[in-house]
Amino acid sequence: MINITPLIPELFLLVMAIVVLMLDLFSSRRTVVVPAYVSMAAVIITGFLVFKFGGDAVRWGSNAIFVADSFSQFFKVIILGAAFLAIGSSFGTADRMTHHRGEFFALLLFSTVGMMFLVSAKELILLYVGLELTTIPLFVLVAYQKTNRASSEAGLKYLIIGAASSAILLYGLSLLYGYTGTTYLNEIAQKTAVYFLSHGFIPNAEGTTDLVGMGPAFSVALMMIIAGLTFKLAIVPFHMWAPDVYEGAPTPITAFLSVGSKAAGLAAIIRIFDGMLYAFSHDTMPNDSWGTMMAVLAAVTMVAGNIIAIRQTNIKRMLAYSSIAQAGYILIGVIAASKLGVASCGFYMFAYMFANMGAFAIVGLYAEKTGKKNISDFAGLSKTSPIIAALMTMFMLSLAGIPPLAGFMAKYYIFAAAIEAGYTWLVILALLMSVVSLYYYANVVRIMYMVDSDNKHHIIPSFPAGLVLALTGIGVLLFGILPQSILDMAYKTASSFIF
Amino acid sequence: MVITVRNPVGSVLYFILSLLAQSILYIQLSGLFVAAFLVLVYGGAILVLFLFVIMLLNIRHADLGPEAAPMIKPMAWVFGVVLLAEAVWVAMGTKARFDGVSENFGSVPEVARLLYGKFVFPFELTSILLLAAIIGAVVIAKRTLS
Amino acid sequence: MDNMILTIITFLPVLGVLAILLIPKEQVVSIRHTTLFFTLVTFVASLCLIFRFDPVATGMQFEVNIPWIEQFGIGYHLGIDSISLLLILLTTFLTAIATLSTFKAVEHSHRGFYISILLLETGMLGVFAALDLFMFYVFWEIMLVPMYFLIGIWGGTRRIYAAIKFVLFTMIGSLLMLVAILVIYFQYHGLNGEFTTDLIKLTGMPLARDMQMWLFAAFGLAFIIKVPMWPFHTWLPDAHVEAPTAGSVILAGVLLKMGVYGFLRFCLPMFPIATFEFIPIISILAVIGIIYGALVAMVQKDIKSLVAFSSVSHMGFIMLGMMTLNLQGMQGSILQMINHGISTGALFLLVGMIYERRHTRMISEYGGLASQMPVYSTFFMIVLLSSIGVPGTNGFVGEFLILLGAWKFNAVYAILAATGVVFAACYMLWMYQRVFYGKVTNPANQTLTDMSLREKIVLVPLIILIFWIGVYPKPLLNLLEPSVKAVMAQVEVGRAEYNAYHGIVESVASEIELSDAENVKPEGTE
């Protein structure tokens, strides 16, 4: 009998997703409140369950299929947090929909479940199915505003590119399977590690070899996996979809996309590259070509993301490019391939969640009230809604990495990991780019505070949106000044990996 | 051929052809059950459904719009050749010998054992995935009631 | 009490911010008074430091060291020696004065303005009190945000350009500092197996010469930009001209000192070998800065930018004094930091007062003010003389000590620097002549009123300090001596290795540098 207790949080959330669907069927359709609050409660309870049933793994034989280790717990907290904040800030969006409100939240929860599986999967097929469960509801959510051309276009674009990247990933995974004859990450890890450590063949009982000459196909497999997963993270050069999709999607979904699916994709990359293929970044590897390749990807991503972001006038596009750039910073932690690296990725994602969800919540709120989406439309916000403007300033500064906000701690952590791993040039580049990023983040602040306008929109958030803003604001400040507890948690996640 | 033909019906028929070829590969690996399944479910059921849908939509040649940008076709050829060359390079460069599949590869009990044993979680998760996809399809496809 | 007092002083302004947030934004007067109250309380609290400070003890006092982020070995570590004591006093004093001076100058968004001032004060105090590299960096960066707002919201016409330029320059400088902090952190771990960013522990760490060079350069760039030394000074005139008066006062009075303080506290003690290597470069830059700043100041049409360029010149003096590495030079350098804070702060206040009346700072707009505003002209003259360094004022003491130190260090530099004093007299007095003497030609000037009581209250403490330091600087110098000697001793560690290195590599250039370095014998026996 397989022990399925580690799966309880996921199963619970699945059931709740179906409950939300049913609720919509039976309750009054006038209001969006019931399914939304039920979803929020479900997410919170799932969060508790994640901790209650952590530490164990679902196994088949001796191989883990699904692990609820501290690493996955930490990322699940981020994902659930993102889901919670996205639901909280989508009351307004959902309210204006004329139809399918319940399905909106159900799909969001389905996608969350997919992410949770993705984070915990220790088996290639489960990983792939988790990824699909993550993205397919998101295709729909992105295109949710059917009457809006931009939304439909974004949905279609996301669907085609997402499907293509999934196919590439699947091809890579199947090649990997063909090589190693197993889909379990730990078995692949053993085989590749043994191969690389001995640089020879491992004869098995029949005198043949399990892992024969890692020829070019192995490289191709890894490249395909990198390509497939970096699509999800919107790493340059696989980032083309992000700005259009981010711009067209309903704002809470954009936020969820930029935090939740990024966190899940990041976790998968870490599992594969720092967990399964740690031999590549191991000291014994004479030629760390994969690290260098990923470092180049990270560098290009930071440069391109930040420089293009400067020229954006639409705030959602600006945030899209900024989140591309942020993915570049996070990749540095993956490249460091150390305990500190993994921990820093986790903490960065955590800090990023607060700032980015908060920023998108404000953008969504503002667009709802005024229908305006350009950065220049924020002029005079400090006069009409000083608290919102102050919060936005905090989020922007946190994204830019100004102390004492959480974003600074996160950057410090990432850079510490990279310097420990010897990537000083990457850190200097990253810091230069964060000065560039300060320019466009400060630009938002400048427009809010220093440009006068006859803007008379006084923005009063609804209760759930206010809750979202309060939580994100507190998070950004608190985890910047007192990050100790989260840092410890993040550091523990690294114990799931061998370094 | 599936994607080069501009007539959707032809496209589907070519797809069936490629599936048949794929099932022959399985037969070569003595996986009769999988091969038959591929033909029955994919070739028989799903693609016939495709055909129905396409015929119902009744797309005319003129509706398909003009040919894509002129540079697309030559570029597609170039990339195709590059990919093919890469595949050949990969195949040649790889010294791996396939160990051969187990005796009962593709037999009914073996497939069942895999689906409901080793891969039960992905399998079950796939059902959830399909559920989500159905909901999504309904949401997207349903006409807005005013 | 002794270990709490620095924390209290540093975070009192934050308490003030919270208090201001409770006041409705329409009640401008009570916002002003609350701010003034908190800045005064902070000043009084920092005065308490003097009485409890042990002037003969070496090392840090009022230390508090609590683990903050244990995983990184980052501690909440505050502590001061007499150098930071004086700078903290200067900060609290100038902030209080600047606050008092703004009662009429701010025209809108009062609450935001005073919140920025108070946050800025916390950042500045934190920088001077921090004994942990990470904390220092955090405070260093925190200051950017309120300063950005101060310049950008309440500044002049080109305020946004100036604000962004200020922030970007500072950020570019400090980013390398962050890398250097991380490198030191791992270096120390490699040597001692402990993760820490504690300055006291890191000082005296035996680093290889090349490593020291890189780290010194990385820290130094941040500090050089902040000082600012030629050729990184271009942000300063923009920021000064556009900033509101209070912003200029704090910028000139305190922010610029942070660069020099950074050298004294971090670069010199931690990287002694590299210090000797960099002395020629930095002192040449300092001399260029002195002469360049003075020459450019001479041709300015705007009084404020004239004062700004004079700052570049004065900061050159301060850096030169520090690079002499002898007692007089360094004492003079620190004393001159205080003097520059007082006299340039006072100059900006005076310029601000006339600007409030006429809304222009062009020299050509004025003339003959002496007859219209006799009290104002007198105050201006005193401050001006102090800035030039006339005997009897504070400026003389500082500059004299620096030149004395520089003479021992390198006579050529001393002579070149001395021309800076002459130039200063030229541009200052010429400006004074054009503004105050002659007949009132511009009819707009005929209705000008003289200084109000509040304005006099603002300036009188500064004038007292100008004369007090000018006539009787001995207590300050005595106070500084142990700390300066401590820094000198820390630097001296690097001399042997520096000499050894350059003894091995034979080249003409290194021989010249060597002979320079030999002149820099410590003068501790005096």
Image (cartoon, rainbow, N blue to C red):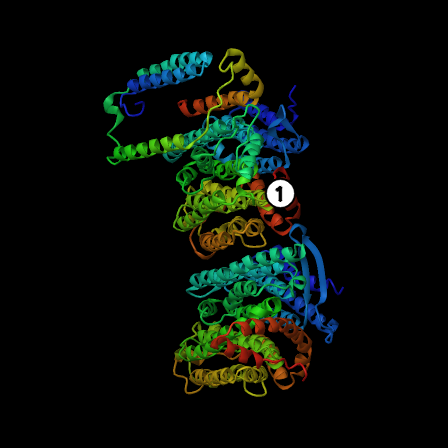
Residue A72 vertical placement versus C322 (above, below): above
The answer to whether any part of residue A101 appears in the image is no
Taking depth in this image into account, of C261 and B111 the one nearest to the observer is B111
Can I make out residue A403 in this image? yes
Q: Among all residues in the image, which is located at the extreme right?
A: C1
x, y percent for residue C375: 53, 83
Is C202 in front, or is B134? Answer: C202
Image spot of residue C129 (x, y percent):
65, 65
Placement of A334 over or under C346, stated as above or below? above
State the SS at label 1: helix
What residue do we see at 60% from left, 25% from top?
Answer: A11
Name the residue carrying label 1. Answer: A490
Q: In this rendering, would C201 be left or right of A470? A: right
Where B42 sits versus A257, above or below?
above
- Residue pushed farthest front? A207
Tell me which corner region of the image, top left, top right, bottom left or bottom right, holds residue A184: top right
Label 1: chain letter: A
Q: Position of residue A246 (x, y in %)?
A: 43, 39
The x, y position of residue A40, in whole percent, is 58, 32
Q: Quadrant of residue B49?
A: top left
Count of labels in the image:
1
Q: Tell me the amino acid under the disc marked 1.
A: Ala
Give the position of the C terminus of chain C as an image quadrant.
bottom right
Residue A82 relative to residue B5: left or right: right
Residue sitting at x 63%, y 86%:
C471
Quick one: C348 or A152, which is closer to the camera? A152
Residue situated in front as seen by the camera: A433 or C116: A433
The residue carrying pointer 1 sits among few (fewer than 14), some (14 to 19) or many (20 or more) residues within 10 Å by Cα, namely: many
> Split into 4 quadrants, where in the image is the N terminus of chain C?
bottom right
